[in-house]
Image (tube, rainbow, N blue to C red):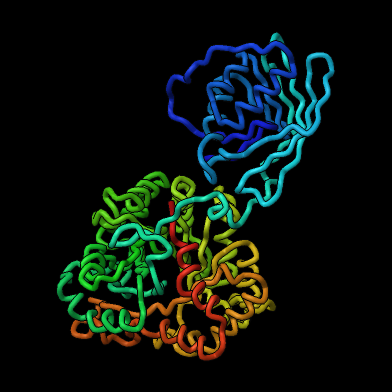
Amino acid sequence: MRRIAVIGMTVALAVTTTTGVIAKTDLVRQPTPEAVVAEHIAALNACDVDRLMAQYPDTIAILLPGGVTVEGRDEVRELFEGFCEPFPAGLAGLRFTELSSSAVHKTINAQWKAEACFLAEPYLGADAYETWSGLMAAQVTTFDGAELKINPDWRQDCGVELQFQTTAGPLGLEDIGNVLAHHHYFVELGDATPEDFLGSTPEEVYEALEPWLTEAKALGAGSFIEPTPFGVGRRADIVKYVADEAELPTMMVTGIYREPFVTDDMPGWVYGASVAELADFMRGELSGDPGVGGTGVPAGFIKLSQNDTGMTATEKKILEAACLVAQETDATIASHITSGPAALAVMDALEGFGCSLDRYRFVWIHAQVTARADGATLEGSWGTGHDPGFDYVMAAAERGAYISLDGIGSGFWSDFYGGFELNLGWIEDLVAAGYEDQILIGSDTGWYDPGYPGEEVSWPGSQDYNSILEFADWMAAEGVPSDLIEKLMTGNPFAAYARQ
């Protein structure tokens, strides 16, 4: 687990490392105290760890806010190597400029500003640099990394090349068209330990779904997000086959559903796995080897779920693993949550694990359930709390979460959650509050469910993939601006789920 540490103009990541020999760097002395500080700033801005370490003797001590002291070349090198990781895992790219300085004997007192494409505004601070014999003997800093104000558009402003990972390969924004952002091809949702999903064949599933997919493409569907995680009868091989046959680029996910739906064909594995082992599973699926379910297709993001009654210990362990992997990959964490207090608690936990929402992306899936609620469910027969459900949704958006309304036009979710006018009202309220870039829409429709023999695509609540496309047309007829509709159907799904 990583923690941000800051060292004046030396901002670094303290990392837990495996044992090994820390590389040594020959010392390079500067002619004056001012030259020591100038070399330090230049080396830091260049993110040249060896050049930085050439200034530090074995007795180096760096004093941080909160009474923290970093001592010795080995520990300082670890800090600098962490710093030189790309943002958001590190702070490479932060540029320091000296604003003023004064000397007291061989100590240089400097005021500076730090700027970067990932900062919303310059950060100002001051350091004292104690030099000795042309080296940096000690530093004292005011730098507090928690005070950095992160630019919410840092990926765009820093020129990060995002790709929409699909069965047809990585796609750019211009390639994805209208995104069916939350629908399913194949799920066995019922038994806590699914039993029938392993007996289905890709061919029979595609034959059943082909009419729905053909119609959706004719209505303008350009790509599909299939967010079925491990635990509910996931068959990535079937999803890939269906997507390939339909010629509909489809994003798959990694991640693990909530208890008790955490088993699939590996009973007990999740319960016995460590955070590191769960992270290895997600990390592998986010790569092309093995990819999701061994298909060779990298997952687009991490999909989880938590119980309304609060996270279980197992769900919290899964969330911690997801945060660890998100820090490494910048993959989005999305979670199916139908309780406002639970959603905010998950966000709190992510912050505690080191996944602050100004650096990492979080999607609250099925936020419509809370939006429709009178308030949070209280214990026993005491009804609901004072605060309306939509207040929780707005609180999550204010903290940076994407708000996903996932029952639009769905017979399964009914008009109570999925009515067009109802959902447009929520969208308009979110837009008026300044959150139009954080809104996602879907219908959560489909799917082939092998748990209903003979009714695999006609089980109660099953439905084709047309409703979200019909909703887009309906919004246009209602006078919703075309740029907002484009954002909801294409721009926002790409911003939420595309990754490096």
The picture quadrant where one finds residue 254 is: bottom left
Query: Residue 465 appears in which quarter of the rendering?
Result: bottom left
Q: How many marks?
A: 0
Q: Residue at x 25, y 70 (%)?
A: 247
Q: Quadrant of residue 179?
A: bottom left
Do we see residue 196 in this rendering?
Answer: no
Position above or below: 393 against 121: below
- Residue at the (45%, 52%) spot, across then down: 161
Can residue 28 be seen by looking at this rendering? yes
Percent across and percent down for residue 237 are: 22, 63
Residue 439 coordinates in the image, percent (x, y): 54, 71
Could you tell me residue 150's position as x and y percent? Answer: 64, 51
Relative depth, front residue between 433 and 3: 433
Please tell me which residue lies in front, 316 or 471: 471
Q: Is residue 447 above or below residue 308?
A: below
Between 96 and 300, which is closer to the camera in this rendering?
A: 96
Residue 462 higher or lower than 153, as above or below:
below
Q: Residue furthest top?
A: 133
Left of 122 or right of it: where is 312? left
Q: Position of residue 64 (x, y in %)?
A: 70, 31
- Residue shown at the point (23%, 73%) measured from the top left: 246
**On the rendered structure, is 359 left or right of 111?**
left
Identity of the residue drawn at 54% across and 44% down? 87
* Residue placed most toward the observer, 488 or 97: 97
